[in-house]
Amino acid sequence: MAPVLPGNDSTKSNKVTKPKKPLYSRASKACSSCRRQKTRCFPSSDSIACLRCASMSQVCSFEEDLLKRATDPDNSKENIIGCLPNLDQNGSFDIKQTIQPESQVFKLSPIAKMNLNIDRKLKTLEAGVSQILGLLRREGFSLSEPAAVSLVDTNEVQAEFGVESKFEHKQHQQARQGNYEPGLDQIRPTGYAEQEKNFDEITTYTDYNEVTLNPFGSKLDLTDIPSLGAAHSTFITSPFASFTQCVAIDNLPIPLSNLALPRDHVRNSGSEFFIAGILTKPQAIELLSTFRERYGRWVSFAHHISTELLLDRIMSKCPLLLIVACSLSLKYSDPYIRKHAEKYLRQSLMKELNQNLMIMPQCLEFMQALVILSVYALTLSDETFSVDGWFLSGVALQQFITKERAGNLISDRPEGISEEFQRLTVYRLWNHLCLAHLVNSVLSGRISIINSLNLHSGRKVLDLPESTNFDGRMVAECSLQLIVCEFLNSQSASKEKSLQVARGELVKWLEQWSYLFEQPANQFVELGYHYGYFLVLFHWNFKKLQSETTDVIYPSIQDSSVIDRILDVADSVSMRSMLYHTEKVLDSINSVDNSSYFAFLSDQVHFICVYSALVMVRLLRVITNRDRISVESVNEDLNQVEISSLELTRKLDRCYKLSVRYKEVSVDENDIPQKYATAIQSALVETFPAVQLSKAWLTDDNLEEN
């Protein structure tokens, strides 16, 4: 039979025409919005919402009902698995084990996903507030009374040091745009922009179930790390501890009794501190108050304790801490007091430190004093008294481990200090000691006594309600310094493989902690990252030089040609990379506008920045020499890094700007800032005498106009 063509008369028949089947079948139940509008409700093919709600980008009651069932703790997995399994990172539901023969993926609308995130955050906030209220009630605080007035303006302190509450701490983890090194894609992780995490609070250690034990080792489950505070099983079952349970106290050797039954060593030299006439008590109170405002974040003093009461407590337990605090505050205090008290304070510091170093175990205040000495070792040293930050931080870590293993650090808290705040102080002390020791290990080229397992215990500070942005930065910087330290001390036979491992660890670190780049005072996290990356590249090129020559590379520390020899073997990629990272270090420190805040930064930060400036000058000299040789040579130099005179001036001016900052904060012609300023300016004049730098540093706009 011939086919019937359109328009043929034979198509007209008495046959009844069936209505067309609708494109969408109606839902078995209309959503709330469609019922209110009295319109038909059709299901969507790829969304939980109905077709009308999805097209109008509004929340559908189907989504609300499903999310309510999913987040209701009374609903078992079996009750909801047929309609709402797990929500993946893209906001999709993978519906399996249902009556449908094939698996389907349904997506939430953007508004529904936002509501889900808000609901989760509100529940987290509610749980945190409930926990805080419970702690306050247990401590006997009346919730109807006004809070105690702090001696320090909280807003001022937060603005000065970038401190914020835990719930304000973490915004969306966003990929940072720009500021990445051209030509080195391995620095930026693949898919980095898509790895956004929608947390509004600081990331807890439980959000990272697994960490690298060390860059060249195995993985570690963070849930297996013991918390600080309780006695460790290794201590409880140790022969020394077991022996004390079998022998009367009078029959115990003294070292065993000190370990098993630690007693804080109380000195009576506190009154002698004022009797000697070094400082009056009002002067000591003023200096201690200054110390709390400028450097208190390193020791975690309770804000509700007055400075007068704090001074009395410190004097009765550890006069060394008061001497250290006054010595550090003295630098930018009244010139008259500094002139008459500095020398005698330094003598008292040396005497008190020598008398306490051999006593084991020590109190928490002694470890706090060693933290300050380790972080500000260069500032507190002079011709008669040299402070070694690596040594003192190592001593403090051993003191901490001795006391913490027995579970005494949190229980032995002063009157008026809650257990929660004492726990926060202990975690902070551990992290600050670890950071000071790791940084000094890297700076001095000595190995670290830090165990990777013990280092990661400090991550649990992020789970405490009172943890701040500063705590997050400390944990991140400890992890970063560990990566660098492990690489520098690695004995891998293949230098290329060790570099690849270190780069991979730096990428992982950046993925994990990149949200801190968006937080207040982020320049120090960014500064540490670029400084660490530069050290990895610089050390790798030294290994490269070692493999290419049989000559003695390092005859003495006075040999000034070592740096140039290392840079000479570097290829163009390494040179560009090292130049980029040193430049970013200088950009970070030069972005600090507050001169007082700049002056109070740790000695390590200042040294790192000056070191980066000096190395940048050397890098630029090698680069310009290569450019000149390449122009004179017929053959093209593959290791050439082209740089224009304008770009050279801009980079050198960053170094000059830093030297000017150190001149501004210098108080004496022989102090550390003055020496740093002189060192940078001397390097600039000796290396690039023809380059004219503005006394008031040039801006990019000025350079472009010129």
Image (cartoon, grey):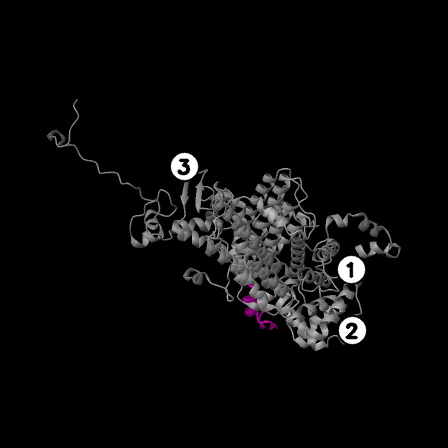
Horizontal arrangement in the rendering, residue 625 relative to residue 295 (left or right): left
Q: Where is residue 79 drawn, in percent x and y?
A: 48, 44
Q: How many marks?
A: 3
Few, some or many C-alpha atoms within 10 Å of disc 2 (few <14, some 14-19, many ≥20)?
Answer: few
Choose the circle earlier in sequence order: 3 or 1.
3
Q: CA distance from mark 3 to mark 1?
A: 73 Å
Q: Identify which amino acid the numbered label 2 is placed on.
A: Ser
**Foreground mark, 3 or 1?**
1
Residue 465 visible? The answer is no
Q: Are marks 3 and 1 in contact (CB under 8 Å)?
A: no
Of residues 572 and 183, the one drawn nearer to the viewer in this rendering:
572
Residue bearing mark 3: 100
Residue bearing mark 1: 357
Residue at the spot 65% in from the left edge and 73% down from the top edge? 333
Horizontal arrangement in the rendering, residue 297 relative to residue 346 (left or right): left
Identify the element where label 3 is drawn. Answer: loop
Residue at the spot 81% in from the left edge and 57% down from the top edge? 258
Q: Identify which amino acid the numbered label 3 is placed on.
A: Gln
Q: Are marks 2 and 3 in contact (CB under 8 Å)?
A: no
Q: Residue furthest top?
A: 1
Choose the circle earlier in sequence order: 2 or 3.
3
Q: CA distance from mark 2 to mark 1?
A: 21 Å
Magenta extent = 143-162
Residue bearing mark 2: 271
Of residues 608 and 289, the one drawn nearer to the viewer in this rendering:
608
Q: Where is residue 11 drawn, in percent x and y?
A: 14, 31
